[in-house]
Image (tube, helix red, strand yellow):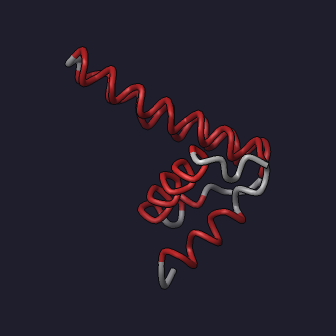
Amino acid sequence: MADFARFYRYYLGEHATPACRYLHFVGSSLVLLVLLATLITRHWALLWLAPLAGYGCAWIGHFFFEHNRPATFRHPWLSLAADWVMYAQMLRGHHWR
């Protein structure tokens, strides 16, 4: 993609169903909880749970609700950035419907 703004519009289109977006939100929230738990407990082995929680929830949304391939497969870094932008927007009340 030429620029992030164009990619983000594409990314939102790949997350059209509320169930998919909700699962992304849950997955990203779990990632933050895993990171926090790791920092508090200093049990660094917990870090393997972060991608499992984040991608697990997101991919369930894509495979069972969107019926498409996650953008991560084609654009991993742009997709990761877009997911956190969408997460921040959802915290502010956007993209829930």
Q: Is residue 18 left or right of residue 50?
A: right
Residue drawn 77% across the image and 51% down it:
66
In the rendered image, the residue lying farthest to the top is: 41
Q: Where is residue 65 in the image (x, y as percent from the top left)?
A: 79, 45
Residue drawn 48% across the image and 52% down it:
84
Q: Position of residue 26 (x, y in %)?
A: 59, 33
How many labels were placed on the picture?
0
Position of residue 87 relative to residue 74, above or below, is above
In the rendered image, the residue lying farthest to the bottom is: 2
Residue drawn 63% across the image and 43% down it:
59
Instruction: Name the image quarter holding residue 70.
Output: bottom right
Instruction: Name the image quarter holding residue 44.
Output: top left
Q: Position of residue 85 (x, y in %)?
A: 50, 57
In the rendered image, the residue lying farthest to the front is: 92
Residue drawn 67% across the image and 63% down it:
12
Q: Which of 9 and 90 is in front in this view?
A: 90
Q: Position of residue 10 (x, y in %)?
A: 65, 71
Position of residue 32 relative to residue 67, above or below, is above
Q: Is residue 67 left or right of residue 9?
A: right
In the rendered image, the residue lying farthest to the left is: 42
Q: Is residue 16 left or right of residue 72?
A: right
Q: Nearer the viewer, residue 87 or 60?
A: 87
Instruction: Name the image quarter holding residue 34.
Output: top left
Q: Nearer the viewer, residue 53 or 19?
A: 19
